[in-house]
Image (cartoon, rainbow, N blue to C red):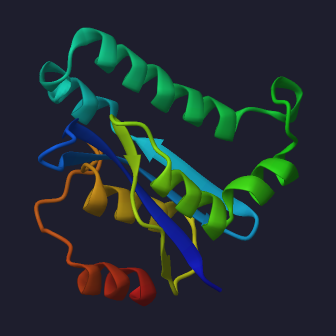
Amino acid sequence: METLLCPIYLSTNALSNDRFSIGLIMACQNTLFFNYSEEKLNKIKHLFPSETYSVIKLYLKSIYKSLYADDTASLLNREELLQQWVNEGYLSYLERYSNNSVLFGKTTKVAIPLSEEVFKKFFEMYVFPSENNYQTEEYSQENLLTDILVR
């Protein structure tokens, strides 16, 4: 069982390739997790013009709402939504054709079963530590996988 992992970045300068990780998508068969750090977004908002910041915030919120909407509020039912997003080709497409501010990173496969706990650990490692679950020890990829597999 392979899990797809796709980081989402914000680019402050397209010429210098500066970017900040802001969100993460992880998907596997019939499971999909997405989140972004609103706290981190607020901390770096001064790096963007106010219009750009508003577009970024709206874009991230719309992704979140579209992925977590109930079937009655969405044009696609949950199965169709998963079929679209749990797809390496689609995530790779987003990597190639993203706008100048929000960038989808390279989609990688990890050989680990996907769960909410696994997603939270990867989110803390790639994006931003949770305020509720702040850990002082840093996770390397090896430590993260060992910690998850031991539990």
Q: Position of residue 93 (x, y in %)?
A: 57, 57
Please give the name of the residue rendered at 24% of the width and 50% of the height, measured from the top-left corner. 129
118 over 109 or under it: above or below: above
Q: Position of residue 110 (x, y in %)?
A: 48, 81
Q: Position of residue 107 (x, y in %)?
A: 47, 68
Q: Position of residue 82 (x, y in %)?
A: 76, 55
Q: Nearer the viewer, residue 79 or 103?
A: 103
Number of dots carrying numbers: 0
Image side of residue 11 versus residue 113, left or right: left
Seen from this angle, which residue lies furthest front?
15
Which quadrant is the C terminus positioned in?
Answer: bottom left
Image side of residue 42 versus residue 99, left or right: left
Please give the name of the residue rendered at 57% of the width and 75% of the height, measured from the top-left corner. 3
Q: Nearer the viewer, residue 10 or 151?
A: 10
Which quadrant is the N terminus positioned in?
Answer: bottom right
Image side of residue 131 versus residue 29, left or right: left
9 over 139 or under it: above or below: above
Image side of residue 121 versus residue 26, left or right: left
Please give the name of the residue rendered at 21% of the width and 51% of the height, measured from the top-left corner. 134
